[in-house]
């Protein structure tokens, strides 16, 4: 979707086929790849949902610019003699403030959504087709557009029908919605994805910093990994549900990936062609991107006077008259085409394990080892700039640092990609970490891993008070113990408490002290106990039956820590005898 900038002659009708051809020509070696396992990022605790191509789009499927980039790679700007920078390809020039907003948005989601792999060039591609990079960078120093950028009225007349959702707060229309700002969010979508990209306390869709960061979060929603082709296409289609839109954005994405340069604000190249064939929307408030020149009042130049054959006006040398055609230049010898350079992933012959051979961690802890893989060519040398995708599979709640189940990492200069730290969840069991080269079917590196239950190696009572009770009564004190592991408090450790028959026989006793179950009946074994965050465990109240004696309570934790506690049950004291009368004195 793009803003309506007035009527102009459409240079050329851009079809889906043409756009697709441009994508193929530009992105043959750089298009994001698809992993064979089709894994998707799964973020723990993510509250947002993935915008779906089958649901509402970010822009309400409003019109957009269909201009395509040049088919050749952009030429970087070169230095001028005596200093300064000469202008490179005009289409590769991005307005300074707009470019800064895109890069800052990429940096922000790299931290908040590390598995998304959002390239700022994708924001630039969408910004190009939506608003021509905020009308060529017509923004103030804070990044707010100098004049509003509004899409057509979405009243169902040639466009979708979306009744007002913001009471005109963003688009000035209290009847229907219009897309707003340089990234062209409809108000209802902006309400869900609004961001404050320039930290000024406002969330303004007309500000390129706010809009770019909002678009970044929108594209990354639902755990998308934009290094994956399917996720990338789904993200773009969620912005505007059109195959032609997808192909146009992809063509600009690959063009910008090949090189861009910064130009002053307000000097960016303005697009011409629109998907709605320049139909102005009712009440459109946007001026044309380029002013229409007024009719010329200068009289036409007179035709040159005829001259005599063989004579040349203004000189004696034949063939020097301005109208005389020059001899054609000698054609250059055709140069043989250079063979295309294989992409980094195409240079990889195998993927080798460069990290831990296996991993083990206790539930809730981070794994000490790291998973790493090295991409090697046929000669065994490492290949840099290769995208390697790491995926956690298996029935555990283990995640990479940041909450993702899969991440994509680019290899370093040595050809090595190292996955983020892996954090074990509370669910124990085995799982596998798999590393694959994106867009290749090479053998994956697989690292087995195990999450073990929390353990304790020592148990001790928190009190040394004797535990004594009379038959048929309740023990005055409860048993509390503390579990430690290697001298540190052991939290969340499973434990079992049993009234045992003897020190040599650990089976449950059938008489003596007991706990009460939920139904009030005697229970002499408690399972499923767990220490608290300080490693402490407080047992329920204990009761004595009518059998006096000395009994044992044994507590055992996961990891083997064991403690046996002595319990004494005494018979009730007999009532004291009544005093007898003394014998009478003898006479």
Image (cartoon, rainbow, N blue to C red):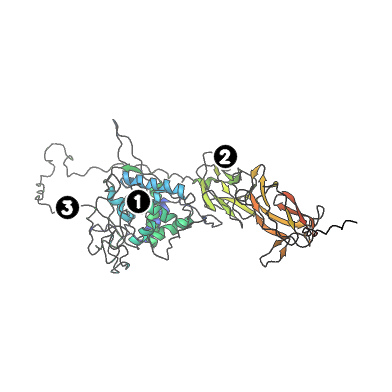
Q: Is residue 94 visible?
A: no
Identify the mark at residue 108; answer none if there is no mark: none
Q: Residues within 10 Å of mark 2 (few under 14, many from 20)?
A: some
Identify the mark at residue 293; answer none if there is no mark: 3
Q: Earlier in the sequence, mark 2 or mark 1?
A: 1
Q: Residue at x 66, y 45 (%)?
A: 484
From this viewpoint, which residue is outermost toward the right? 587
Name the foreground residue: 234 vs 569.
569
Identify the mark at residue 210; answer none if there is no mark: 1
Quadrant housing residue 81: top left
380 shown above or below 249:
above
Residue 398, how many percent across, how many down? 58, 53
Name the foreground residue: 104 vs 96.
104
Residue 246, how many percent across, how many down? 40, 58
Q: Nearer the viewer, mark 1 or mark 3?
A: 1
Give the alpha-carbon distance from disc 1 to disc 3, as whole Å.
35 Å
Q: Earlier in the sequence, mark 3 or mark 2?
A: 3
Of helix, strand and loop, which one carries label 2?
loop
Q: Quadrant of the C terminus?
A: bottom right
């Amino acid at each position: 979707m793009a803003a309506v900038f007035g009527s102009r002659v459409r240079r050329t009708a851009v079809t889906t086929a043409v756009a697709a051809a441009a994508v193929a020509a530009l992105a043959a070696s750089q298009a994001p790849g698809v992993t064979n396992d089709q894994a998707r990022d799964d973020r723990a605790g993510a509250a947002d949902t993935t915008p779906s191509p089958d649901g509402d789009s970010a822009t309400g499927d409003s019109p957009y610019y269909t201009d395509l980039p040049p088919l050749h790679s952009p030429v970087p700007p070169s230095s001028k003699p005596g200093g300064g920078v000469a202008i490179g390809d005009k289409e590769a020039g991005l307005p300074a403030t707009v470019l800064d907003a895109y890069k800052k948005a990429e940096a922000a989601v790299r931290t908040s959504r590390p598995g998304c792999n959002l390239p700022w060039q994708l924001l630039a591609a969408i910004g190009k087709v939506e608003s021509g990079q905020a009308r060529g960078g017509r923004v103030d120093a804070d990044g707010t557009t100098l004049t509003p950028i509004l899409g057509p009225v979405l009243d169902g007349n040639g466009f979708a029908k979306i009744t007002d959702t913001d009471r005109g707060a963003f688009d000035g229309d209290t009847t229907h919605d219009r897309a707003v700002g340089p990234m062209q969010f409809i108000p209802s979508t902006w309400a869900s994805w609004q961001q404050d990209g320039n930290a000024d306390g406002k969330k303004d869709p007309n500000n390129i910093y706010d809009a770019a960061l909002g678009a970044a979060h929108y594209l990354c929603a639902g755990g998308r990994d934009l290094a994956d082709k399917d996720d990338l296409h789904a993200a773009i289609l969620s912005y505007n549900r059109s195959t032609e839109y997808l192909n146009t954005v992809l063509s600009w994405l690959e063009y910008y990936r090949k090189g861009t340069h910064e130009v002053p604000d307000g000097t960016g190249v303005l697009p011409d062609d629109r998907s709605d064939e320049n139909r102005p929307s009712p009440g459109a408030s946007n001026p044309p991107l380029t002013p229409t020149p007024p009719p010329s009042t200068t009289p036409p130049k007179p035709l040159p006077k005829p001259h005599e054959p063989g004579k040349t006006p203004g000189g004696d040398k034949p063939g020097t008259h301005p109208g005389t055609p020059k001899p054609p230049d000698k054609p250059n010898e055709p140069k043989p085409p250079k063979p295309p350079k294989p992409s980094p992933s195409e240079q990889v012959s195998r993927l080798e394990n460069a990290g831990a051979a296996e991993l083990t961690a206790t539930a809730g802890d981070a794994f000490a080892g790291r998973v790493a893989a090295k991409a090697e060519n046929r000669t065994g040398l490492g290949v840099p700039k290769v995208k390697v995708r790491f995926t956690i599979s298996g029935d555990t709640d283990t995640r990479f640092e940041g909450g993702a189940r899969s991440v994509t990492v680019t290899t370093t200069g040595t050809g090595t990609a190292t996955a983020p730290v892996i954090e074990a969840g509370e669910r124990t069991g085995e799982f596998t970490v798999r590393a694959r080269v994106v867009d290749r079917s090479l053998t994956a590196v697989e690292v087995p891993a195990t999450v073990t239950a929390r353990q304790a190696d020592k148990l001790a009572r928190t009190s040394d008070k004797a535990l004594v009770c009379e038959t048929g009564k309740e023990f005055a004190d409860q048993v509390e113990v503390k579990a430690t592991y290697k001298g540190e408090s052991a939290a969340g450790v499973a434990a079992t408490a049993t009234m045992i028959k003897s020190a040599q026989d650990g089976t449950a006793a059938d008489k003596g002290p007991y706990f009460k179950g939920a139904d009030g009946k005697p229970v002499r074994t408690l399972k499923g106990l767990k220490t608290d965050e300080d490693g402490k465990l407080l047992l329920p109240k204990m009761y004595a039956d009518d059998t006096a004696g000395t009994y044992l309570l044994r507590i055992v934790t996961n990891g083997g820590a064991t403690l046996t506690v002595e319990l004494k049950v005494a018979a009730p004291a007999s009532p004291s005898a009544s005093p007898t009368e003394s014998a009478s004195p003898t006479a």
